[in-house]
Image: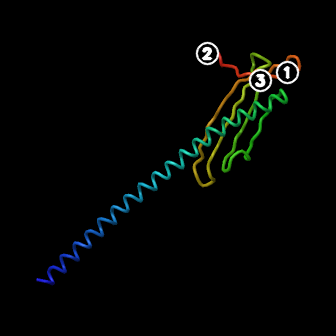
């Protein structure tokens, strides 16, 4: 009878260990999936803010000199690149259209790309230079 009990106890221990191994595997897979999702969301937010920063950088540059320009910058964020393009609006010579495209991601990952745009009117009256946001006409 004792040998039979030892056999049942051994089988029970193996079944419990297998169940725990399966449970730990499921938990590990869930943690890894959540971590990857969080990393992707972080890259998306970083790309959003990097694109907005590109528009702000262009606005600051427009305050200094009212001219069209295009630039690519990799210094604003690690593993990120922002491309800024400023052009004069066709309808109004004092209005500038700013487009910024941000790309965030490591070389071995799929990059997240976000864009931001802005329209600004630059005026200089009485030695004061102003840059006002302009709403697009619908």
Image quadrant occupied by the C terminus: top right
Q: Callout 2: helix, strand or loop? A: loop
In-image side of 21 versus 72 (left or right): left
Is residue 45 or residue 112 the one in the foreground?
Answer: 45
Image quadrant occupied by the N terminus: bottom left
Location of residue 49 in the rendering, given as x and y in whole percent from the top left corner:
64, 38
Q: Residues within 10 Å of mark 1 (few under 14, many from 20)?
A: few
Location of residue 26 in the rendering, given as x and y in whole percent from the top left corner:
37, 58
Q: Callout 3: helix, strand or loop? A: strand
Name the mark nearer the viewer: 1 or 3: 1
Q: CA distance from mark 2 to mark 1?
A: 30 Å
Pointer 2: what residue? 138
Q: Residue at x 66, y 50 (%)?
A: 79
Q: CA distance from mark 3 to mark 2?
A: 22 Å
Pointer 3: what residue? 131
- The disc, 2 or 1, on the residue closer to the chain's N-terminal end is 1
Q: Residue at x 85, y 29 (%)?
A: 65
Q: CA distance from mark 1 to mark 3?
A: 10 Å
Q: Would you place residue 106 above or below residue 123 in this image? A: below
Q: Residue 76's image quarter?
A: top right
In-image side of 17 versus 38 (left or right): left
Pointer 1: what residue? 128
- The disc, 3 or 2, on the residue closer to the chain's N-terminal end is 3
Name the mark nearer the viewer: 2 or 1: 1
Q: Residue at x 65, y 32 (%)?
A: 116
Q: Residues within 10 Å of mark 2 (few under 14, many from 20)?
A: few
């Amino acid at each position: 009878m004792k040998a039979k009990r030892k056999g049942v106890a051994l089988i029970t221990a193996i079944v419990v260990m297998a169940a725990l191994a399966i449970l730990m595997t499921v938990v590990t897979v869930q943690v890894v999936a959540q971590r990857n999702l969080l990393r992707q969301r972080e890259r998306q937010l970083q790309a959003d803010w990097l694109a907005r920063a590109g528009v702000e950088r262009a606005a600051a540059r427009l305050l200094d000199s009212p001219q069209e320009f295009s630039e690519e910058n990799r210094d604003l964020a690690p593993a990120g690149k922002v491309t800024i393009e400023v052009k004069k609006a066709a309808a109004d010579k004092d209005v500038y259209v700013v487009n910024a495209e941000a790309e965030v991601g490591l070389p071995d990952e799929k990059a997240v790309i976000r864009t931001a745009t802005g329209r600004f009117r630059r005026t200089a009256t009485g030695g004061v230079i102003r840059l006002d946001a302009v709403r697009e006409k619908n």
